Amino acid sequence: MLTKLFLLALLAATPIQRDRLRSTLEELSKFGRNPDGGVSRIGFSDADLAGLEYVKRLMRDAGLTVTVDPAGNVHGPRDGREQLPVILFGSHTDSVPHGGNFDGDVGSMGAIEVIRAMNDAGVSTRHPLEVVVWTDEEGHHFGKGLFGSRASAGLLDPGELDRKDEQGITQGEWLRRYGQDPARIGDAIRKKGDVAAYFELHIEQGGRLEREKKQIGVVEGIVGIRRWTCNVTGFANHAGTTPMPDRHDALLAASRAALLVRQEVRAESGTQVGTVGYMHAEPGARNIVPGRAEFPIEIRDLDMAKVNRIAGRVMDGLKRIEQEEGVKIACAPLSEDAPALTDPSLRRMIQESASEAGFSTMSMPSGAGHDAQSVAHYAPIGMIFIPSIGGISHSPAERSDWQDVANGAEVLYRAILKRDALP
Amino acid sequence: MLTKLFLLALLAATPIQRDRLRSTLEELSKFGRNPDGGVSRIGFSDADLAGLEYVKRLMRDAGLTVTVDPAGNVHGPRDGREQLPVILFGSHTDSVPHGGNFDGDVGSMGAIEVIRAMNDAGVSTRHPLEVVVWTDEEGHHFGKGLFGSRASAGLLDPGELDRKDEQGITQGEWLRRYGQDPARIGDAIRKKGDVAAYFELHIEQGGRLEREKKQIGVVEGIVGIRRWTCNVTGFANHAGTTPMPDRHDALLAASRAALLVRQEVRAESGTQVGTVGYMHAEPGARNIVPGRAEFPIEIRDLDMAKVNRIAGRVMDGLKRIEQEEGVKIACAPLSEDAPALTDPSLRRMIQESASEAGFSTMSMPSGAGHDAQSVAHYAPIGMIFIPSIGGISHSPAERSDWQDVANGAEVLYRAILKRDALP
């Protein structure tokens, strides 16, 4: 009986139900909904907590025994037939302010759909399974993001629970308000070896799958990111009375720097990206030559050596700009996140699962951060991407085709069973 | 007796008293003084009005009959011996926020010192003389500036008195608070022919006189200014997931535009200037490709044809940037101020007065706006510049050497008498 079902799962469509999955996503979208149809379901907000209550109800209805750890992560374990490490899968349900209804939600609802489909088909597994919904992935209030998954990997910064948000409420207080004991945060840590594999289904949040007309993205890893904040010091002066050769215009130097970042990022082939997201000029009046300017730099790639190489060329170029513009440019490193590569065997299982289900695939890096990168510290990870319409994310216009959402859950279902076949 | 004094004025130092002039400037600097030694004496503020009371007292002490017109301009007429049009001279005493103690003040206190020196020397003139201190030259609250002098030229915009400042107070209400009747604003207009000449002594606010080691600047005219506000529309997207070739980065387009403005301004010889004073990116986060950016352009020169030629090349260049960056750039004209040329004969009188007093001179445009440009609509104007230390202005660090201040008053005194010798 088991073998027959297992074969069925490999050779034909699984019992994933597209419309059932869609209805749970639509129901979830009501929590924190904005008039434009998107959501503001900020981590730790009332809307987020209400959404998680809905998630827990769904988990319980699917027969899972729901627990919440001291970091606020919601767990739904399902027994396996053998004493083996758990196969973990899930995502998050918090959003950015004025975000959409797919980022995180697809992986969370997709994970629950997998359990319901297995229940429908009477599928049991050798390994215990566990659905997880991580706390505060977006990190709107505290800036860092991936709070719950970082807690699970013991990656919280010293003093992070004492950090205050813009309302003056500490991270620890937020945990306490929602029934957790911050003193027990260490209990959220997963031991190495306890998790056999972690799978995360997610929307791409970019436009590559759509452009390449591929149905499933097999994620090679989550890119590393280096970030700096740069300050240019020139000299503010009257825009009418200061001759062009006498100027030390901080904003023109910053403009050259932004173009330099793009030039150096583009100077190598590959999928690396680099961004300057704002420019603040002081005093910032139309009739005053800007004396100061602040701008950020971030560079991302799967290969940190490449990130560092590009950064080195950018910093060299900034020295030339300093000299030519008669300004000082100081770039302070803000953060450095190492890349998290996915596990080659899990990647292969995702690839094969997609192919067996008849879906076209492509390998790609994840340019965005995900909870999987925290989990990579204690378990092999695999990630499945589905196309984002127009490549749009972190926006009320964030969309994926419902069939693509179901395809993603289908691949997740199959990949879990493939992994379950191994020790 | 008159002839003797007149010759004396031409051949030797006038009775201008440097230390007396300095003491009035130092006394004026107490009104609206900031802890850093500069002033915030915004037009229509209590500090400004208190400063003007001091000015009126000085005028009365110098024997002038003080009147205030419905635009708030303070006038101090002195009789002439003949029925001739008036020789007008003065400046303003309001400041920018956190400004200095020389901009406007030197010309206002210098004008009163000229009267005191003439009184000391028993000099009378054929033409009536008139000291004027114009209202709200800097225009901090209402943005336009030159309020009093524009009113004297009938150049106020329709509805300008109904415009509200950031506190919701209209220009008309400000006038009423300070004892004027806005309905009578038209009475502030000076008739063409009533003013034989207008002289304004002012600090350079730039660094050319200092760099060229010249004591007196003979102003060729006040530059024309064209201003635009430009908006770039690209597409905001995730900085991690949006490949470089898919981006429509509004801030990079704005950066190229700022550099283009400089390039086109520099492409011709001359003293023209062009400035981009700020850049606002939206959403303005370090991890989002900017979807919108706003920046201003201003271009100044004595020759408006040159301003327009440069602007034309900038607008052509923006079209190329639009295409290459895949963005839209819309530049809306904000204002256009025509250049105001000084009168060649008044310029010559200033030049000769300086030379006769033994001062080195240079001809130069004024890159900043001045009340003289309003007066140019109804009378010939002449302007005298003295050096600004380090070229710094609109700053608490604004300074001029006290001897240069006295030299400026000396030239003003002599130029007035030269003009008085003509009909």
Image (spheres, coloured by chain):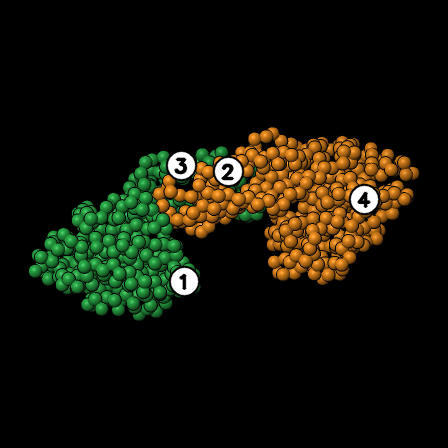
Chain colours: A orange, B green
Is A290 positioned to the left or the right of A29 in the image? Answer: left
Which residue is depicted at the point 64% across and 48% down?
A100
Quadrant location of the C terminus of chain A?
top right
Q: Which of pointers 1 and 3 indicates the residue nearer the eye? A: 1
Camera-nearest label, 1 or 4: 1
Q: Is residue B385 left or right of residue B274?
A: left
Identity, as a three-letter code, of the amino acid under mark 1: Asn
Q: Is A277 drawn above or below residue B73 in the view shown?
A: above
Question: Which structural element holds mark 2?
Answer: helix
| Mark pair 1, 3: CA separation | 39 Å
Tell me the quadrant of the picture where the N terminus of chain A can be found. Answer: top right
- How many circles with numbers are drawn on the protein? 4
List the residue tagged with mark 2: A319
- The verdict on a common chain for dots 3 and 2 is no
Secondary structure beneath dot 1 equals loop
The mark lying in front, picked from 3 and 4, is 4
- Badge 4 marks a residue whose secondary structure is loop
User: Which residue matches tag 1?
Assistant: B34
Marked residue chain, label 4: A
Which one is nearer the viewer's eye here, A391 or A25? A391
Q: Position of residue B233 (x, y in %)?
A: 50, 43
The vertical placement of A58 against A257, above or below, is: below
Left/right placement of residue B209 relative to residue B291 reads left
Disc ID at residue B263 = 3
Tell me whether marks 1 and 3 sit on the same chain.
yes
Q: Is residue A161 above or below residue A278?
A: below
Q: Looking at the image, is mark 1 or mark 3 earlier in the sequence?
A: 1
Q: Left of A384 or right of it: where is B61?
A: left
**Is residue A130 shown to the viewer in this render?**
yes
Callout 1 touching callout 4 (CB < 8 Å): no
